Image (cartoon, grey):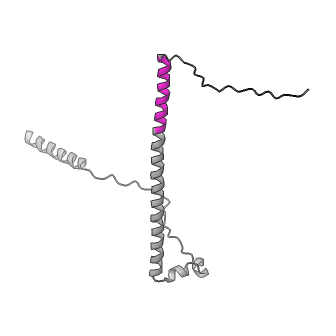
Amino acid sequence: MKNKHIKIKKEAKEAVYVGIPLDDVLRTEMLDCSKDLIHFLQAYEKFKVIREEKTAAIEATRRKLGEITTLTAKLKRLFPKSRLTSLCGHKAFKQTVIPPITQSVKASAPRAPPPPQTHQDDLDQLEKELAEIEKQLGK
């Protein structure tokens, strides 16, 4: 027996539509999701703008730093060579030790600074003098 190939015509696929009853709760949930998505996309756009500003600021800073380094190199070339910079690396310069300045410290307890003379002391003295004058006048 021979195998016969039977050709079966495939039916054209039709679009299947399933109706969903859209009640108010489902509509509000869909709108809330859409609203959240829009807020997320807006926040992402703000983030992109901030990132671009940040990269632009970094590039400007790098350019300025390059200008500063070139200017300092030019200044170094223009200034005369000094002996101090060449002496700093010399052995004899490193071996010379400058003794630290020490102040003589007394063994006694540190003195408390005298209290500053204030206007209150002057006022008290004037009040005493005024009281004495009043006593003399009252007699």
Q: Position of residue 36 (x, y in %)?
A: 48, 31
- Would residue 116 be visible to someone looking at this image? yes
Q: Position of residue 132 (x, y in %)?
A: 15, 44
Residue at the far right in the pictured view: 1
User: Looking at the image, is 88 positioned above or below residue 43?
Assistant: below
Q: Position of residue 129 (x, y in %)?
A: 16, 47
Residue at left offset 45%, top offset 43%:
46
Q: Position of residue 44 (x, y in %)?
A: 49, 41
Q: Nearer the viewer, residue 26 or 78?
A: 26
User: Looking at the image, is 80 positioned above or below residue 69?
Assistant: below
Residue at left offset 48%, top offset 54%:
55
Q: Nearer the viewer, residue 2 or 23?
A: 2
- Is residue 34 inside the magenta stretch? yes
The magenta stretch spans which residues?
A: 24-41
Quadrant location, the C terminus = top left
User: Looking at the image, is 52 positioned above or below residue 13?
Assistant: below
Disc tally is: 0
Q: Is residue 23 left or right of residue 114?
A: right
Residue at left offset 89%, top offset 28%:
2
Q: Nearer the viewer, residue 17 or 42?
A: 17
- Would residue 139 be visible to someone looking at this image? no
Q: Main secondary structure of the magenta part?
A: helix
Quadrant location, the N terminus = top right
